[in-house]
Image (cartoon, rainbow, N blue to C red):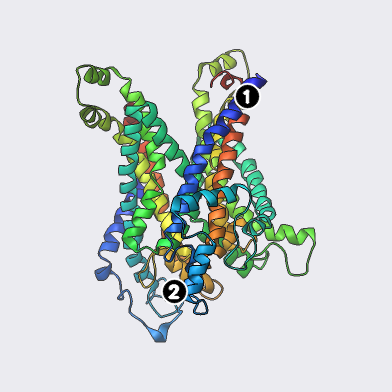
Amino acid sequence: MKAGPRGGLLFLATLVVASLLAPYLAPFAADALDLANRRAAPSLLHWFGTDELGRDVLTRVLVGARVSLAIGVLSALMSAAIGVAVGAVAGYAGRWVDDALMRATDAMLAIPRLPLLMLGAAVLQPGVPMLILLVAAAGWMETARVVRAEVQSLSSLDFVQAARAIGANPLGVIVRHIVPGIIPAATVATTLAIGRGILLESTMSFFGVGVQPPTASWGNMLYQAQTAMTSEPWLAIFPGLFIFATVLACNAVGDAIGSSPSQRQAVP
Amino acid sequence: MRDAMRGMIVRRVLQSAPLLVLISVLVFALLQAVPGGPLAAYLENPNVRPQDIERLRAAMGLDRPLAAQYVSWLWAFVRGDWGYSFADGRPVLDRVLERVPATLELVGASTVLALCVALPVGVLASAHRMFDRVTSLVAVAGISLPVFWFGLLLQLVFAITLGWLPSSGRASFGANSFADRIAHLVLPVLVLAAVQAAAWSRYLRRAMRETIGRPFMNAARVRGVSERGVLWYHALPNALGPFITVVLLDAAMMASGAVVTESVFAWPGVGSLFTESLVKRDYPVLMAFLMCGAMAVMVLNLLADIAVRSIDPRTRGAA
């Protein structure tokens, strides 16, 4: 494994551990106000500075990581489940089922994803669990397409034809013979979806329709920082840096899985 | 050949009709999900009495079955009657149309800039290993950038700290010089183009790599074509087809990028109209935006097919 993806994995692992241990690691409580030290610049005491209520930005970045990572990972897993189901059924069933499912996929891809999500969030005013559902509902199409193509090429192979010929139950054929073959491609798509989910959540929260304060997420920290760019730029720089680094790590890992030799063999 | 092309266009337009219907159902359903329904804006207004709301409901046909409401909404939409903005009472169509030129200016400029970067980078990265390492790294970073954050950073550095460029808007108040317009264009174009160039150079590199492995490339080398000639005159034309398709299919991504960029830089285009309307819960404008976005994506998909067919003779026979 090359340096990029290894660094990416290391960063993600550290981030997960640090955010889980945030109450013990972080120097302050997440919502502890320090009114004497409001809008303080980064210092040895407050590494990333403090916000307009004197809350420690480093602490909030670590706590916010839980929300941002949870939304990214859970929405990616859910959209992987939807995408694999849609893609596998479409690719295996063929004919009108394939047509109908792929038309629906195309329709979803044709609507600009971010504006649709923002409108959906403005209408439904979701909490975090609903937000995960929304991001997942807007992110399964790529996986469905990749999986469908894989299933189509797999089902033409002899061992699948043989299983069909001896009259195996179609569901059994999908689960036993097709699904193992699509795992590599689905893994790549899911890894990339984690990064995309984090970007979507942070962008929605930045526009005020995602995670709502006082819950900290990287996106809504930037929403609050937007007005203070001139005087307190650290409020915007650090949360954004974490979004960038996390998405970069996901993309580096996803690319590495996608171009590894095992993946190339698995895709005929 | 011309007939085949015309047949393809007609077929694609017919195919996209059910897609548009699907999308319109989705958008219409979203409006129904608004708490309080389409009259939510009036429900919160203490000056509107309950009997007035009942009267409005009847007058606007909101007491009819949903399916009937949907059909009349869709028919009105097709005729260009997109309703009236909750925010200022003006026709939605007018509000959208007056914002279109600014968006075209921004997206056009950034697309040109992104292509100027992505084309040479994509081609050279497919042939030179070290150059590929560096540009791949930059490209992955580019697609991982949170657009709004990148915009804020550029504002912080070039507008606030250095004071070289204006931080927002399309022109200074009262000024009407060309230089002023360009100065306002620089930062938002950089933000949008960075994301596009990063994604597109990756696509082109991949398409080039797939072409370079094919036998006709070796045939060209055996005939004595120089490495540079092989790359630019044999590989690039073959990689361009898939590349153009992907670029035009990316239109939905560009719409998202434009919404964010325009909002961060207060660029008076369709994208910032969307976020302004989002804050005001101006649903007629929001719905019109989504429908237009979907239609634009479909038109661009069709253009992609036409473009590929005209530059790549191999695709013309296929249905």
Would you place residue B31 above or below residue B209 in this image? below
Q: Is residue B244 visible?
A: no
2 and 1 marks on the same chain = no
Residue A42 numbered mark, or none: 2
Q: Which chain contains the residue that carries disc 1?
A: B
Q: Is residue B283 visible?
A: yes
Q: Is residue B134 left or right of residue A55?
A: right
Identify the image quadrant of residue A44: bottom left
Disc 1 is placed on an element classified as helix
Rendered location of residue A40, percent (x, y)? 45, 79
Residue A199's x, y, as percent? 43, 55
Q: Is residue B299 above or below residue A229?
A: above
Residue A77 is situated, as x and y percent measured from the top left of the image, at 30, 47
Specify the quadrant of the image occupied by residue A51: bottom left
Question: Of the residues shown, which amino acid type is indicated by label 2?
Answer: Pro
Residue found at x 37% / y 83%: A34
How crowded pointer 1 is (Cα within 10 Å; few <14, some 14-19, many 20+) is rated as some
- Label 1 belongs to which residue? B5
Type of amino acid under label 1: Met
The one nearer the camera, B39 or A21, is B39
Q: Is residue A69 above or below residue B174?
A: above
Q: Which mark is residue B125?
A: none
Q: Which residue is at 59% across, 61% downward? A: B273
> For this rendering, which residue is in front, B215 or B309?
B309
Q: Residue at image x 44%, y 58%?
A: B32
Q: How many marks?
A: 2
